[in-house]
Amino acid sequence: MMLSLSGALYLGWSLGANDASNVFGSAVASRMLKFRTAAILASACVILGALLEGQAGIETLKGLTQFTLKQAVVSSVAAAVTVTIMTFLGLPVSASQAVVGAILGIGFINRHVNIAGLGKVLVCWFGTPVGGMIMAIIAYKILAYIYNRISLDLVESDILLRLSLVAAGSYGSYALGANNVANVTAVFVGAGYLNVPAAALVGGLSIGLGILTFSRRVMETVGRRLVRLDPFSALVVVLAEAITVHIYTAIGVPVSTSQAVIGAILGVGIVKGISTVSTRTLSNILVGWFFTPLLAGFIAVALIFASHLRYVPAP
Amino acid sequence: MSQDAAQTREKLARSLFRGLFEVVMLNFLFKKERLLRSLIYSYLENLGTVMNHFSIAMDLFLEKGLSDEFDFLVERTHKSESMADDIREEVNLLMYRKALIPESREDVMRLLETIDEIPRSVELVLYMIQTQKLLVPEFLVLDIKELLRLSIECCDLVVKQIDLMLNKQEGIRALLATVDHNESHCDHVERRIITKVFDADLDPFLKLQLKEMVVYIGEISDQADRVSKRVNIMAAKRRV
């Protein structure tokens, strides 16, 4: 069983190692919060999110095509390999896009793709950075109004920002678990290998393990990008990302937390009238959007073909 | 009437919030921040002591010239200045132990670094008088007293301004304007004294010594003005 799930577990592990930086990166990189505290908090919230709200995303992804167990294993391995290659190439990678690409590759072989479900997913992909941006603009306006009105002194303002960042990070981790658990184990539900609660638990645990074991460096590297913003803006970015991802969780579509973060940073820049995201980052997102599903689909198809090859001894 | 009632309710809610905040947050959860606040207050208290010793020492010097009592006060000022350095060091260590968020850490460190120039200037003036056995001609005493009064007033205002910032009270900008006004006045008095020195029939070497002393005293209000501006920026940064 563990061998069948190995691709999914690796995917969940790398997802946790990479994406936790989007929610607790700023707090850890700025030394507001110890890595250990952030990692434990994030892992717990991810597992909680996966168990409580992971079902909708799992239902959407498993409905994109029909799977056999072998195809489920292949699609999760293809997605994991794609994430690794894209990370190695330094391109922004979305596990959600890799998984959907791999599922579509399988669907292409099966000649069965749920077009309506796919349309919903594509719209949500486009809507993720846009949603992050809109949410950041709204959150900035509302929070700034409240923050300015309660007029805090230096220490109080500091404590409030720190607590809010921890709360927003925890909420973001919850949303991450709820939204992205489908990427990890939905295909196995589609293949009838796991039921939904078991898939949520296995997926949540693998993401949590990735956070606990390998997210420190990514948190510190990615977190520094957010730390360049002032603490209030960093809080708005994390909160906007969490709300955006949570909304997509309710819709039932796994999305990229990194893209939601970049959208939110862009939104903060719009409110403050400054340039916060380079055109290079935006073009990298577009490249990632295009190549990630394509590569994952291609790898899935190639793996399926490879699995059908048989050794034929020479007569 | 209803507006008054609303304002009273708002004030009451704020006091309640602050009370709860002090009790729950500072006493139980954020001890480092509470310690930091008390250290900043100790630092300010110490600055007050330095300025007090300085004021008494200068009065004594301008009225009676150099004396043992003056030397004693110079020593006391030096001790207070050293204590200020120790407190600043303690604050910095606390910051390295992750009190406050990075941006605030930088703000507080820079603020203390800027304030620290005041006791340093004060000590410089006193040491200059003590080591160079300076003598101030009678016709300059009143002007120098005025310069001292304004400089010390600037420092007092800056301490008040920091207190306002630490207690989220309003009026920081108003104090900035007053400090700025006093500092300009100090510059004016400083120029007037230097002109008088060089117009007078004094030994050229004494003229240079007096000019140097006046410039050092003038530096106190300049530094206070820099601190005041920094406090204003820190307060402004806490509005988004």
Image: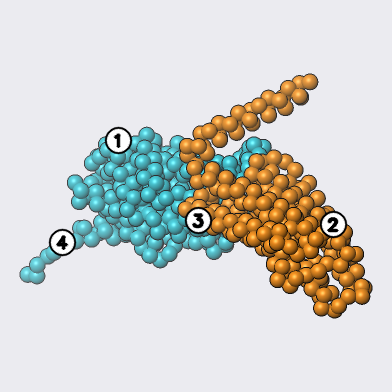
Chain colours: A cyan, B orange
Q: Is residue A245 left or right of residue B228?
A: left
Tag 1 and tag 4 share a subunit: yes
- Dot in front, 3 or 4: 3
For the point 74% across and 72% down, the residue is: B132
- Dot in front, 1 or 4: 1
Mark number, residue B146 = 2
Question: Tag 2 or tag 3, which sits nearer the N-term?
Answer: 3
Say if mark 1 contacts mark 4, CB within 8 Å.
no
Tag 2 and tag 4 share a subunit: no
Q: How far separated are the C-alphas under marks 2 and 4?
A: 101 Å
User: Which amino acid, by three-letter code, is at mark 3?
Assistant: Leu
**In the displayed structure, would residue A267 be above or below residue B207?**
above
Mark number, residue B93 = 3
Q: Quadrant of residue B119?
A: bottom right
10 Å crowding of disc 3: few (<14), some (14-19), many (20+):
few
Mark number, residue A310 = 4
Q: How far separated are the C-alphas under marks 1 and 4?
A: 37 Å
Residue A116 x/y as whole percent: 43, 41
10 Å crowding of disc 4: few (<14), some (14-19), many (20+):
few
Q: Secondary structure at mark 3?
A: helix
